[in-house]
Image: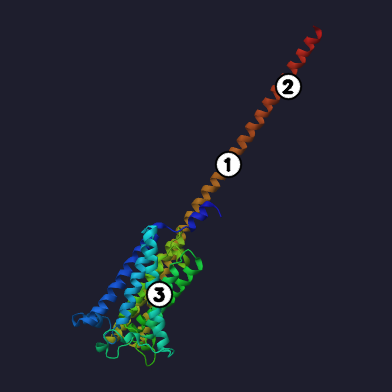
Amino acid sequence: MDERTSSLLQPRQNVVHLLNQFAYIGSLITILIGILCLLSWQFTIFSFIQNSFSPTSVMNPLSGIGFILSGCSLVLLLQQKTQNSTSKILVISIQILLSSLTALIGLIMILTFIGTIHVNLDQILFSNKLGGNRISPNSSINFFFIGTALLLLQFHTKKYFTRTAQIVTLVASIISMFAIIGYIYHALSLYKFPFLAPMPLSSALTFSIFCLSLLFARSDHGITKILTRNTPSSTFALRLIGITLTLPAILSYLLVLCEQQHLFDAPTEMALLVIGNIILLSIIIWINTRVLQHIELENLLIKNELEQKDINLEVNAKELAAKTLSLEEENREFVDKLETRDKLLDIEDEEE
């Protein structure tokens, strides 16, 4: 691998820094939501915060604790680079502890739901106010996944650990996405297990923010490294991610609002959805084509420049060859003259 190819495959530090900042902000938002969840259970004045997210399901206090633990763990994970060797050991120890507690919360609740153990961990805090409120099974699975991912990211120098952590995080984000889409389309089966508590919308949104933050925390390692490389394709991918994550959901939500207002019938809404997807895909194709054309033009200019340099090198080589021949002829003539001179000197010596 030559030096140019190696430089292209290296992550761009400005992009890595930007994604790390996003991860840091996301972790702080996660901590804040967890604190607001506990405050809403402690003080009635804060209850509107959760009810504004989802009037049908309120975040369990155990979820708030899980978000606080995971958010603090991610903050410590991001701050390890700035710590000296003495304090770094302490930070790593606390981070591992918080990650383990997050995963343990999820694992205990999963085992409780499947009947392996009987520990109602989500009924301890504010038991007199819960009124049957339980943490959802999909929330428990997500806490187990993100806690495991936080533990694995501590060993980010190990390639397979980082990839496994990011894959687990992607699974948790997909579970959260199902819940959010389920709330938008009023599809209960997407965010609720039969006969069990549904994942609150506030939890689904918080999980989505945190999973993105977790993926960006080690963006220069693992499967996310491809987004930070110094290549046009990485830049193109970063641009498209925002479009693919937002525009289809916004379009679909607008159609749901139109349906609620009885502005269109079902066939018209389906036709509008198809037209919107066609327009969206056309925009993506146009952007893709524009970027590829830009790359092709750059490659063409580089190719022309290299061809011109090859021509110049050939001309220079021919000139050099001609000069070499000329020098060889001059050298041959000079040698002949020296030989003639030596012969004359020998003759003179013999006559003497």
- Of labels 2 and 3, earlier in sequence is 3
Name the residue: 42% across, 86% down. Answer: 111
Q: Any mark on residue 119, and which?
A: none
Secondary-structure class at tag 3? helix
Name which residue type carries label 2.
Asp
Q: Check whether the beta carbons of the residues at disc 3 and disc 1 lie within 8 A of each other.
A: no
Q: Residues within 10 Å of mark 3 (few under 14, many from 20)?
A: many
Residue 340 against residue 236 in the figure, above or below: above
Percent across and percent down for residue 120 are 35, 88
Q: Nearer the viewer, mark 2 or mark 3?
A: 3
Q: Can residue 321 be seen from the camera position used here? A: yes
Q: Which residue is denoted by mark 3 in the rendering?
A: 100
Percent across and percent down for residue 278 are 41, 75
Give me the C-alpha separation between circle 2 and circle 1. 34 Å
Q: Check whether the beta carbons of the residues at disc 2 and disc 1 lie within 8 A of each other.
A: no
Q: Which residue is denoted by mark 2 in the rendering?
A: 336
Residue 118 is left or right of residue 261, and the answer is right
Name which residue type carries label 1.
Leu
- Where residue 152 sits, quadrant-wise, is bottom left
Q: Which residue is denoted by mark 1 in the rendering?
A: 313
